[in-house]
Image (cartoon, helix red, strand yellow):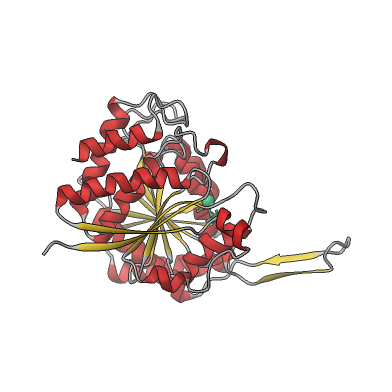
């Protein structure tokens, strides 16, 4: 009997449903081609549902989603809803409740895609950022007092415990071992770089740095260990991206540097990410957001969602099918698209989905 996977689809807001639809189209084709089954079930979580029902997420949402093998997400963020409500109430809530403690974000320049970085190509821009996804400033304690007065105090602290740090680092070391540049035949060593701020945030990054070297020395001696301050990382991501293989960092730093990474790989139209619980249910998404001004025009780029689908298949163990989607995307960027920006691809959203699906079939 062929394998079968239950996938929850949350189209979400703005152009989310349009790009998710193309992702599902390509995923269905890959399933047919590679001999497994995908059962999709749609959920209407997002801004429209919130405006209609005044409920951000039903109480049973996490339990409902937990019944699936993976979650495929379009985008969250609605122009008529105050910033923060949906982001915190849906996206972050699901990451935390489903304990998706890794955010995996490949920074990969596909062939034919224009990068703003002069003289760098697909060979140079090809690394992965492992972002801690359920701790740090995002979940640290905080509060406000004397609000609205000249003496208002606001606190939001970066909190990590050894357990959170260690499981994230172990994932990153494992990832470097399996998928680093040596594993991919691109180098004679797999390298993991820790991105921190040990020169200022001396408590939190002392914890990260000690754990990094202890774990690396004890259990992954063959993996080369590097350390970069986060500000310098931004500099090297632009100046010498070829130095990087796998990087691991905190939630907030990871949030920031992956947007920079996305721009170097051609922008939000192509950048995909996975919110991963290695022992549970993971959620895959284009990292670009809902781009509401393009809603319903069939001009948004669906490649980021399609790449998120490829990541999902690889995480589910359908590696060949995931790779086939990526190869098809590379073919489309190299030989078909005029550009990656919405309305400038030379094709509509659904046509880009058709092109990729046609190459996977
Ligand atoms: C991301 C986004 C989210 C984050 C927002 C929308 C809460 O920027 O996935 O990078 O900060 O993690
Ligand atoms: Mn972000």
Q: Position of residue 220 (x, y in %)?
A: 28, 65
In the drawing, does residue 183 fall left or right of residue 268?
Answer: left
For the point 52% across and 67% down, which residue is it? 135
For the point 62% across and 56% down, which residue is it? 51
Foreground residue among 202 and 348: 348
Foreground residue among 289 and 242: 289
**Furthest residue toward front:** 52
In the drawing, does residue 53 fall left or right of residue 101?
Answer: right
Q: Position of residue 54 (x, y in %)?
A: 63, 63
Instruction: Report the quarter where the C terminus lies.
Output: top left
**Furthest residue toward left:** 1
Foreground residue among 321 and 193: 321
For the point 35% across and 31% down, which residue is it? 121
Q: Is residue 273 visible?
A: yes
Give the image quarter of residue 10.
Answer: bottom left
Residue 88 position (above or below residue 231):
below
């Amino acid at each position: 009997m062929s394998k079968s996977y239950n996938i929850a689809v949350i189209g979400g807001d703005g152009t989310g449903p349009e790009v998710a639809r193309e992702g599902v189209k390509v995923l269905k084709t890959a399933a047919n081609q590679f001999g497994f089954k995908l059962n999709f079930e749609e959920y209407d979580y997002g801004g429209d549902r919130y405006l209609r029902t005044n409920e951000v997420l039903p109480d049973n949402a996490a339990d409902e989603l937990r019944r699936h093998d993976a979650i495929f997400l379009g985008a969250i963020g609605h122009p008529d809803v105050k910033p923060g409500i949906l982001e915190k109430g849906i996206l972050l809530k699901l990451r935390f409740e489903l304990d998706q403690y890794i955010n995996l974000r490949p920074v990969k320049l596909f062939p034919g895609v224009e990068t703003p970085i002069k003289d760098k190509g697909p060979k140079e821009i090809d690394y992965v950022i492992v972002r801690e996804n359920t701790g740090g400033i995002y979940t640290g304690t905080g509060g406000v007092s004397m609000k609205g007065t000249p003496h208002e105090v606001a606190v939001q602290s970066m909190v990590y415990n050894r357990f959170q740090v260690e499981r994230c680092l172990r994932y990153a070391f494992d990832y470097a071992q399996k998928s680093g540049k040596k594993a991919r035949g691109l180098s004679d060593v797999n390298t993991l770089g820790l991105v921190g701020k040990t020169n200022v945030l001396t408590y939190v990054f002392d914890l990260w740095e000690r754990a990094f070297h202890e774990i690396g020395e004890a259990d992954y001696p063959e993996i080369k260990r590097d350390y970069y301050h986060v500000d310098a990382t931004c500099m090297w991501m632009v100046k010498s991206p070829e130095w990087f293989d796998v990087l691991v960092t905190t939630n907030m730093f990871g949030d920031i540097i992956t947007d920079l990474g996305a721009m170097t790989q051609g922008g939000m139209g192509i950048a995909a990410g996975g919110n991963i619980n290695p022992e549970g249910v993971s959620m895959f998404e284009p990292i670009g957001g809902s781009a509401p001004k393009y809603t319903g025009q069939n001009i948004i780029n669906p490649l980021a969602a399609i790449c998120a689908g490829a990541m999902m298949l690889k995480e589910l163990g359908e590696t060949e099918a995931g790779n086939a989607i990526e190869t098809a995307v590379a073919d489309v960027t190299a030989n078909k698209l005029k550009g990656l920006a919405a309305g400038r691809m030379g094709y509509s959203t659904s046509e880009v989905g058709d092109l990729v699906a046609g190459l996977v079939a």
